[in-house]
Amino acid sequence: MNLVRFQKPAYMYDVNNLFNDLLRDFSTASASSACKKTNPLVNVTDEAKKYILEFLVPGFEKENFEVKNSDGVLTVKGNVNVANSETSKTTRNEFCIADFERSFTLPDDVETDLISAKYLNGILLIEIPKKEVETAKGVFDIKVN
């Protein structure tokens, strides 16, 4: 009789981890382990006269944001101060608001001194105007080689 070594297929580990995560009791997890630093979702839109960045950041206040432009890199930081209440006992905590920081390299065709930001209904909207492209007008003779 030969002994054969058995090894679970790799996909089984993923399935086991999935079930462990689904069945885990979040009420025993501490706030620091359940609330990881994550990056918010961002939509980037390229319009004719401007770029628009939309950050999905519910639960913040406009005072919690810091938007900087340094050497062509736009950095957006969100800092939140959530006071942990010792008087109330949370039995289940499935969401959290965490600090974040995201950086974007700006293209050369933007007006960096005219960048504006506003926060409304959980969306941080940053508008980055483009430089006006001067098109040559008039009639020009083009030599054919």
Image (cartoon, rainbow, N blue to C red):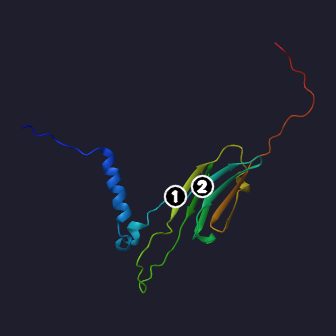
Residue 126 occupies which quadrant of the picture?
A: bottom right
Classify 104 as above or below 65.
Answer: above
Q: Residue furthest bottom?
A: 87
Mark 2 to mark 1 CA distance (whole Å): 9 Å
Classify 47 as above or below 2.
Answer: below
Query: Which quarter of the image is occupied by the N terminus?
Result: top left
Percent of width and height locating residue 35 = 44, 66
Residue 65 occupies which quadrant of the picture?
A: bottom right
How many numbered discs, if any? 2
Q: Residue furthest left?
A: 1
Residue 20 occupies which quadrant of the picture?
A: bottom left
Write the residue at 63% across / 53% down.
43
31 vs 78, left or right, is left
Q: Residues within 10 Å of mark 2 (few under 14, many from 20)?
A: some
Q: Which mark is residue 3?
A: none
Q: Residue furthest top?
A: 145
Percent of width and height locating residue 26 = 38, 70
Q: Amino acid at mark 1?
A: Asn
Write the residue at 57% across / 57% down.
41
Classify 65 as above or below 50.
Answer: below
Residue named by callout 1: 39
Classify 114 as above or below 29.
Answer: above
Foreground of the two, 118 or 42: 42
Q: Amino acid at mark 2?
A: Val
Foreground of the two, 113 or 86: 86
Write the residue at 55% across / 55% down.
102
Q: Residue furthest right?
A: 139
Residue named by callout 2: 42
Contact, mark 2 vs mark 1 (Cβ under 8 Å): yes
Percent of width and height locating residue 99 = 50, 65
